[in-house]
Structure formats: structure tokens, C-alpha cells
Image: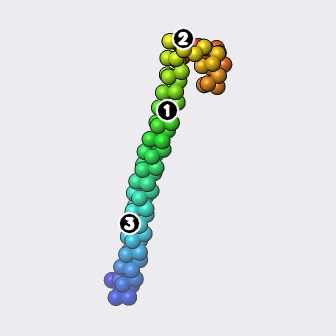
């Protein structure tokens, strides 16, 4: 048998614990959401950069295959050694 003051204190502490748990859960959910958004943005940026680089390589390889530029010049344009460049041919 609790007196009224003890019962009110128990209710008060339970309310604080509940509010703390809810805030923690909300913060965690918000953190996860922001992390996913940042991950998607970074993935898109990396994909664009990789696509541009791959397009550049493909264009230069095609110019070499068509005989428009030499292997040496192609390697130079891509900042690769001739041996590394030949792997793309």
C-alpha cells in the first residue's frame, strides 16, 4: 500500500523513462534515415564519377582501335603506362 505521494513519484519517474525511451527511438530512426540518404547521395556521386571515367577510357580505346591515335598517346591521355593501357584493348 503506497501513499499518494509515492504513487505520484512512481508515475513521474515512469513518465520520464518513457519519454527518454521514445526520444532515443526517434533519434535512432532519424539517424538511420539521414544515414541512408547520405549513402544514396554518395553512391550516386560515385556512380557518376565512375561512369565519366569509364566513358573517357572507352572513347580513347575506340580512337586507338580505329587508328586515329597511337597506343602511346592513348596511354598518356589516361595517365597509364602502355602495358596497363593494353589491358583495355
Q: Residue at x 66, y 19 (%)?
A: 81
Along the horizontal axis of the image, is 75 left or right of 31?
A: right
Q: Which residue is mark 2?
A: 67
* Foreground residue among 78 and 4: 78
The CA distance from mark 2 to mark 1 is: 23 Å
Q: Check disc 1 and report its element: helix, strand or loop.
A: helix
Q: Residue at x 42, y 69 (%)?
A: 20
Marks 3, 2: nearer the viewer: 2
Task: Give the vertical position of 8 relative to 45 (above or below).
Answer: below
Q: Residue at x 39, y 62 (%)?
A: 26
Q: Is residue 84 visible?
A: no
Task: Give the vertical position of 24 relative to 45 (above or below).
Answer: below
Q: How is the image coloured?
A: rainbow
Counting from the top left corner in percent of width and height, residue 73 is at: 63, 18
Task: Give the vertical position of 77 relative to 13 (above or below).
Answer: above
Q: Residue at x 39, y 80 (%)?
A: 12
Q: Check disc 3 and report its element: helix, strand or loop.
A: helix
* Foreground residue among 60 and 52: 60
The CA distance from mark 3 to mark 2 is: 67 Å
Q: Which residue is mark 3?
A: 22
Q: Which mark is residue 52?
A: 1
Counting from the top left corner in percent of width and height, residue 54 is at: 50, 27
Marks 3, 1: nearer the viewer: 1
* Label 3, residues with CA under 10 Å away: few <14, some 14-19, many ≥20: few
* Foreground residue among 59 and 33: 59
- Among numbered discs 3 and 1, the one appearing first in the sequence: 3
Q: Is residue 49 visible?
A: yes
Counting from the top left corner in percent of width and height, residue 51 is at: 47, 32
Amino acid at each position: 500500500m503506497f501513499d499518494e505521494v509515492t504513487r505520484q513519484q512512481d508515475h513521474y519517474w515512469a513518465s520520464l523513462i518513457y519519454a527518454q525511451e521514445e526520444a532515443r527511438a526517434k533519434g535512432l530512426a532519424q539517424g538511420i534515415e539521414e544515414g541512408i540518404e547520405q549513402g544514396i547521395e554518395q553512391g550516386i556521386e560515385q556512380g557518376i564519377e565512375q561512369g565519366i571515367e569509364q566513358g573517357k577510357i572507352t572513347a580513347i580505346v575506340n580512337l586507338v582501335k580505329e587508328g586515329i591515335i597511337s597506343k602511346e598517346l592513348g596511354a598518356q591521355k589516361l595517365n597509364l603506362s602502355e602495358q596497363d593501357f593494353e589491358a583495355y584493348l
